[in-house]
Image (cartoon, grey):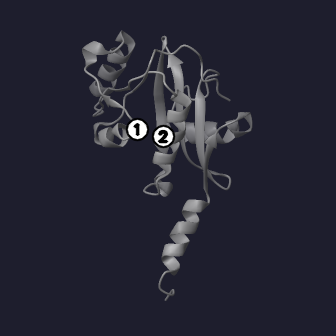
């Protein structure tokens, strides 16, 4: 039986082993594998800013923000099921918010993640206030059975420059 406090130390050590950073071109093969395994598309577009959480060579999670039809959109946040409940999603989102800066940014999260994105400054947005392509996308997701909502992080302006990714 482990000594008292040992399991806490192991959990703390595992958290410290997770590195969250902006991805670069050397990460591309691992990102492609992570995305392919989860059915993510378009993750590595040249204009996307991608952040990665890793434990050694394992990708623990990813997120991206990219321009889309003249606005900035946070897309593709995901943490591998074996790494969840360790604060990785929060750390990824914090780094993405730094990428977003003072610009307006939209996202379409699952409804149960409303509070998670709300802590990062995103607020519910009615469909009528959204750009048409986002209205179409959210309706497509809902028609496919996904319980998603539309949120926006207010900013000074819509996308004026690309966050430029790997």
Image height of 4 relative to 79, above or below: below
Give x and y (percent) for residue 101: 52, 28
Left or right side of 117 for 125? left
| Residue 130 lies in quadrant | top left
> Residue at (53%, 67%) from the top-left corner?
12
Which residue: 59% across, 38% down? 51
Q: Nearer the viewer, mark 2 or mark 1?
A: 1
52 vs 85, left or right, is: right
Find out whether the residues at labels 2 and 1 contact each other: C-beta distance under 8 Å: yes
Question: Where residue 126 appears, x then y in whole percent?
Answer: 25, 20
**48 is higher (above) or lower (below) than 113:** above
Quadrant containing the C terminus is: top right
Alpha carbons under labels 2 and 1: distance apart: 7 Å
The numbered disc on residue 93 is 2
Q: Position of residue 16 (x, y in %)?
A: 59, 61
Residue 72 in picture, x, y percent from top left:
48, 20
- Residue in front for this viewpoint, 146 or 166: 166
Report the residue that reaches farthest toward the right.
26
Residue visible at 29% across and 42% down in the picture: 112
- Please report whichever mark, 2 or 1, sits nearer to the chain's N-terminal start: 2
- Which residue is labeled 1 in the image? 120
Judging depth in this view, the residue of 64 and 138 nearest the camera is: 64
């Amino acid at each position: 039986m482990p000594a008292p406090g040992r399991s806490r130390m192991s959990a703390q050590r595992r958290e410290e082993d997770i590195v969250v950073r902006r991805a670069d071109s050397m990460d591309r093969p691992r990102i492609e594998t992570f995305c392919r395994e989860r059915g993510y598309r378009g993750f590595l577009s040249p204009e996307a800013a991608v952040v990665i959480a890793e434990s050694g060579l394992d990708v623990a999670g990813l997120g991206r923000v990219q321009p889309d039809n003249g606005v900035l959109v946070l897309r593709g946040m995901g943490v591998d099921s074996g790494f969840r409940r360790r604060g990785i999603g929060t750390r990824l989102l914090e780094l993405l918010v730094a990428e977003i800066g003072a610009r307006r940014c939209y996202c379409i999260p699952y409804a149960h993640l409303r509070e998670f994105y709300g802590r990062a400054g995103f607020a519910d947005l009615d469909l009528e206030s959204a750009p048409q392509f986002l209205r179409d996308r959210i309706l497509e997701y809902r028609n496919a059975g996904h319980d998603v909502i539309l949120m926006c992080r207010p900013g000074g302006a819509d996308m004026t420059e690309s966050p430029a990714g790997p």
